[in-house]
Amino acid sequence: MKKILFVINTMGCAGAEKALLELLKIFPQDEYELSLYILLGQGELIHQVPHEVNILNRKYSDASVLSREGQKALKKRVFRQLFSHGSVFRNLPYLMKNICRMAIHGKLSVQKLLWKVMADGGQKNNQSYDLAVAYLEGGATYYVADHIHAKRKAAFVHVDYEQAGYGKSLDGRTYEKFQKIFVVSEEVKKSFLRVYPEYREKTQVFENIIDREEIIQKSRLPGGFEDDFSGIRILTVGRLNPQKAYDISIQAMKLLKDQGVNARWYVLGEGPLRGELERLVKKLRLEKDFLFLGGKENPYPYFAQADIYVHATRFEGKSIAIREAQVLGCPILVSDCSGNREQVQEDVDGAFCQLTPQDICRGIRMLIDDKEKARRYGNMAKKKSALEKIDGDQLFALMNDN
């Protein structure tokens, strides 16, 4: 029986984590022994990990990594891990070099800066594996590269690498220790190879796996919108962070309201910007028009009940939320950015907009006013999702490659 280890930063309710859950399900139990290590030992999706997967964490919290209380717990865990195995002291030269580099470029990111320290402070593992998979960039990748013994190693990249702020100074010689680098889309591949052209031969696309039938089944369960609003329901799903550009969407909602459009915008997700975004909503007097509903264990009834799905972000890897909206036949409006361009075909199964309040407003109004076009987009999105066939053959091939 072959031994495989998966490592991920957290198991919070987000796209990569949900894709990992689906990937874990495809391995035959009689052929593979699966283990999972969560670097920061936190996240509510831990309860959805298949029961046959061996969780290696000695200590774990199932608190959401995005809620206020969960953030407090996570900060305590991060602080403890900083000093585990003397990690922060061993990495002082690395930290000083990258702090200076980030400051010069005006892009100081404490989270990305600390991933190397978190990896070096992670739980020790003396086991050997046939395959070790770092399922997320940053901490998980550094941990597998430097602290795991395996015959083969694979790393996954889920984001636009340049836009997300990673680079050679942060990574060091990490990626040379992997036999394969899997990226979730062609655009993510282009971005990664602009940083690492030397790894072209071992970089290939491995799309996120979703369970289409499960999404459809869960969309029919009780749940969804609880208010009695009778107008147009706009839905967005994603973390409350700068990448998702909710500040611009809120301003677009203000324009819609000023134009007398009978619509309400709902957001499913949590994140560090919640307080700031709520203050902007209050400032623009949109408390009844732009609503933050938090994270939902089953978001699919909301997709099924929404009139329009909007994904106006600054950049993407390959959005799970867009694919979920496609499965459920939502009319979709996306911003014209990396990742989104690869998922939606303009004027076939969705519409594009520029990332400005005015153009987001225009795109939404177009879908409201042209109901036939919106219906056509939703039907085409559903048909396209039904044709997708994604499996784990690339991982199996890597493991059996002698």
Image: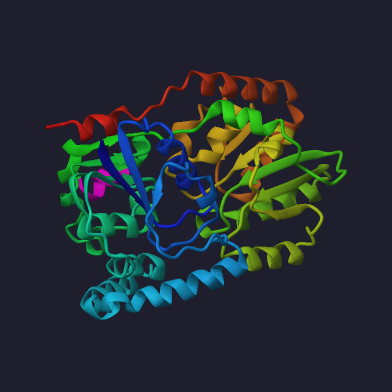
Q: Residue at x 76, y 37 (%)?
A: 222
Is residue 357 in sight in this rendering? yes
254 horizontally vs 36: left or right: right
Q: Nearer the viewer, residue 341 or 2?
A: 2
Which is more toward the observer, 368 or 135? Answer: 135
Give the number of callouts: 0
In front: 157, or 63? Answer: 63
Place residue 83 in its image quadrant.
Answer: bottom left
Whether residue 98 sits left or right of residue 63 in the image: it is left
Q: Quadrant of the C terminus?
A: top left
Residue at 17 percent of width and 58 percent of height? 173
Does residue 161 sit above or below 179 in this rendering?
below
Q: Is residue 310 magenta?
A: no
Q: Is residue 50 left or right of residue 152?
A: right
Instruction: Name the colour scheme.
Output: rainbow
Residue 330 shows in this picture: no
Q: Is residue 192 magenta?
A: yes
Look at the picture and state if 197 lies above or below 386: below
Picture coordinates of residue 369 (x, y %)?
Answer: 76, 30
* Residue 117 percent location from the top left of the image: 30, 70
**Residue for point 64% across, 52% down:** 295
**Residue 101 appears in which quarter of the rendering?**
bottom left
- Which residue is the extreme one toward the left? 402
- Decide which of 198, 4 is in the foreground and name it: 4
Quarter of the picture holding the N terminus:
top left
Magenta stretch, overall SS: helix
**Chain part drawn in magenta:** 191-196
Residue 41 image offset from top left, x and y in percent: 44, 62
Residue 333 lies, in percent from the top left, at: 61, 36
Q: Is residue 147 above or below residue 1?
A: below
Locate residue 367: give its quadrant. top right
Q: Is residue 281 above or below residue 369?
A: below
